[in-house]
Image (cartoon, rainbow, N blue to C red):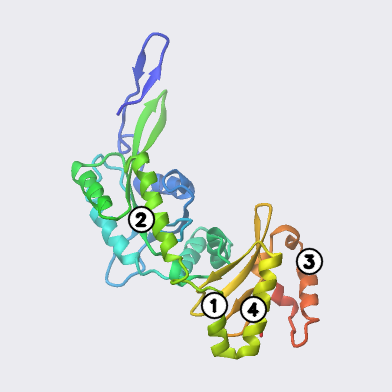
Amino acid sequence: MSLYEVGEDKLFLLPQVSFASVKVRERADLQRLLRDQIGIIVPGGMVIAEEFGEWEDSKRRIDLLVLDKHANLVVVELKRTDDGGHMELQALRYAAMVSTLTFEQAVSAYRAYLAKHNLAHDAKDDILTFLDWPEPDEAQFAQDVCIVLVSAEFSKEITTTAIWLNQRGLDIRCIRLKPVSLDGRLIVDVQQIIPLPEAAEYQVRVREKQERERASPTNKWHLENFLAEIERNCGAEVAQIAKDLHDWSAIVCSYVWFGLGELRGTFTPILKIADTKYHLFVVRTDGAVVIRFINLHGKGRFNDRDVLEELRQRLNEVPGVSLSEETSKESQDLN
């Protein structure tokens, strides 16, 4: 496909160039630019690692490792060549290698990425905020791995392989970056060629159906099995307190979120005001109630440190609770 400039009497073909001919480098230029604007090729994505290769006996590295809003991993393989080389084979190996990545390993990779780029963020909090999770949920993390191939052009072998694999349930996208020259400027035409947008929408609906099935009560915690587990761990009295907290939350909050958490069942009351969600506390099946100050800080009135301090003081009025001034900067277990 070619790009044309519209003139008064005719269309003028814009000359195509190669990235190599205009001295655009693969890693230092294309990868850097796409890394900082990942939404161009992975809408709504979050880069958690660059040149990722945290596995044994391999020197191969993923150009960009991305997290999507469904907590799935996206392997981005980038080439500036005119045929893509053997990038689909590389990407398949990478996808297999990261398919067992845990939430904590992803946090560790993102922490290294932040340090490399001198970004003073909290890695775990950033990922939880991005996913809109009150706490880690290993059972729902990285259920699938998507592959995004980015190149100036693709060989027939690559496109045939991608179509064939997509038909068999994998999620592989081919995005073409076509450089053209216009009045001394370099213009890049970005197009997803596989799957076509219409087919991509269908694939999204299929994946969403699969995710809903995985998130059914048979696969996640719900009130009945939560109360049964907390009673086994802590007795009937604590289970009743947990039920009272749940029932109160169901009335005054927007909804109650159940998750697997870190080897423990949990539920979290979510209060939604406008477009902001407040994760008020977490109740666990080991009998603990967790106040995550880090999930409140920066939201609404909780952006004010005095408000967090007032919350700490009020919590300290509860018999048996003693929170130091430093606890408003982190999570605190209330047993």
Q: Are marks 1 and 4 in contact (CB under 8 Å)?
A: no
User: Mark 1 — residue?
Assistant: 224
Q: Residue placed at 73% from the left, 58% from the top?
A: 300
Q: Residues within 10 Å of mark 3 (few under 14, many from 20)?
A: few
Count of numbered circles in the view: 4
Residue named by callout 4: 243
Q: Residues within 10 Å of mark 1 (few under 14, many from 20)?
A: few
Quote the CA–CA distance across marks 4 and 3.
28 Å
In-front residue for pair 267/41: 267
Query: In which quadrant is the C terminus drawn?
Result: bottom right
Residue designated by label 2: 146
Callout 3 amino acid? Val
Q: Is residue 95 visible?
A: yes
Badge 1 element? helix
Residue drawn at x 67%, y 73% as measured from the top left = 247
Q: Is 306 displayed left or right of 139 in the figure?
A: right
- Residue 325 is labelled as none
- Residue pointed to by mark 3: 307
Query: Which callout, 2 or 4, points at the residue further toward the start of the chain?
Result: 2
Q: Is residue 302 left or right of residue 179?
A: right
Residue found 68% across the figure and 52% down from its top = 274
Locate residue 228 relative to residue 64 in the image: left or right. right
